Amino acid sequence: MNRKHLRKSLMGGALVLALAGAALGARTPDRQGPAPASTDAPQQVAPFELASLLSQSPPNVVIIRLDDTEPGMIGSLPASAFGADDEALVKAAPKARKIVLVGSDPVRVDRVARKLLASGRHVDVLEGGSQAWTQAMSKDPTAPKAGARPEEWTQYRKNIALRRYFGDESSAPPPVVKAPPPVMAAPPPPRKREGC
């Protein structure tokens, strides 16, 4: 066999092995155990910040309720939509979206949030849990003092509107109903003109 041909064959084989090793070595084996938890604490979102976020209905944000028995927030999804337990939620949660977790058990919310953070997702949690949401949406916020800045009054009015939309069904604006477009009648056929 020719030395030149042998050298090319060995170099080609080494290149194939190097590429295969890089490709297969970069893969992580599937784990059978629970997902690891992140050491970073998730960011917290205040109830009125979450209400403002929900009112905008951004397509890149998903609000997940961990307590399916709680009355639903408009625009949020129950955790059962992603699986039967927390591990299934961690595996099935959307990767390209910001996730906000809401729940009544702060330990469970923190544990699930840390697992989602460890899996590379952007996660926030509702500050104070679902109890803070219920409390914030059950009564109007206190009005600013008489000499308050205009920005404080604007924020107060916004919070009142959000609270009435998300918390008080009796004072919520009625749903917009569009009437169907009127049906146009066909014009009458042209008349024949008689005469000279």
Image: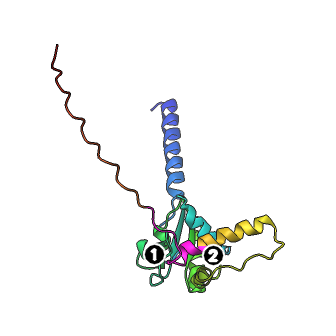
Q: Residue at x 51, y 40 (%)?
A: 10
- Foreground of the two, 72 or 183: 183
Q: Residue at x 51, y 59 (%)?
A: 27
Report the disc number at residue 151: none
> In the rendered view, does 146 fall on the left or right side of 21?
right
Residue 65, above or below 194: below
* SS at mark 1 in the image: strand
- Viewer-side label of 1, 2: 2
Outermost residue, top side: 196
Type of amino acid under label 2? Pro
Give the image quarter of residue 141: bottom right
Residue 173: in magenta span? yes
* SS at mark 2 in the image: helix
> What residue is disc 1 on?
78
Q: CA distance from mark 1 to mark 2?
A: 18 Å
- Foreground of the two, 36 or 8: 36
Report the disc number at residue 47: 2
Return the x and y of residue 9 as percentages of the image width and height: 48, 37
Return the x and y of residue 55 as percentages of the image width and height: 56, 65
Q: What segment carries the magenta color?
A: 163-176
Residue 169: in magenta span? yes
Type of amino acid under label 1? Pro
Return the x and y of residue 68 as percentages of the image width and height: 45, 81
- Foreground of the two, 79 or 150: 150
Q: Residue at x 15, y 20 (%)?
A: 194
- Foreground of the two, 27 or 60: 60
Q: Is residue 38 visible?
A: no
